[in-house]
Image: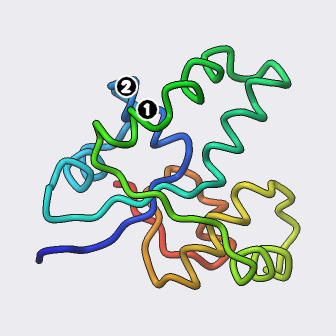
Amino acid sequence: MGNVRFLVDTHALLWWWAHAEKLSGRVRALIRDPSNTILVSAASSWEIATKYRIGKLPSGARIVQTWDSRMQTSAFTELPVTSAHASKSGILPGDHRDPFDRMIAAQSLIEHISVLSIDSAISELGADRIWD
């Protein structure tokens, strides 16, 4: 196949870094494959920092503080948030209110890449999602 790009959702990113069993075998294999490019949205850093601040992710401070080294060690590529992504995120149809999910779905749609996510809300927003 060779050099396929995937956008990893925040929870899958955290599970990858924690070596959690919750990560599906298929997603684990796609991330491990060095011929794939694994993109991480800048919104994931924002989401982790926000969830730390509001008390939903106690380990968030450590993750944000070591973000650059984690990204480098994992050989992941950051996907910046552009105004096109932001506009698309805001106009996606549906009642789903999570701004992080909406951003990742918008980036997936604009960049024509699948999202590695267990969250069916990503699919409901129109993005192609891979898990099992």
Which badge, 2 or 1, is on the more N-terminal residue?
1
SS at mark 2 in the image: loop
Q: Quadrant of residue 35?
A: bottom left
Identity, as a three-letter code, of the amino acid under mark 2? Ala
Residue toward you, 126 or 112: 112
Q: Is 40 on the left or on the right of 72, as rendered?
A: right
Identity, as a three-letter code, of the amino acid under mark 1? Trp
**Residue 82: percent from the left, percent from the top?**
68, 75
Q: Which residue is mark 2?
A: 20
Image quarter in which the N terminus is found: bottom left
SS at mark 1 in the image: helix
Q: Is 82 on the left or on the right of 8, as rendered?
A: right
* Vertical side of 78 occupied by 52: above or below: above
Give the number of callouts.
2
Residue 15's tag is 1
**Residue 98: percent from the left, percent from the top?**
80, 54
Q: Residues within 10 Å of mark 1 (few under 14, many from 20)?
A: some
**Residue 127: percent from the left, percent from the top?**
57, 75
Distance (Cα) linking label 2 and label 1: 5 Å
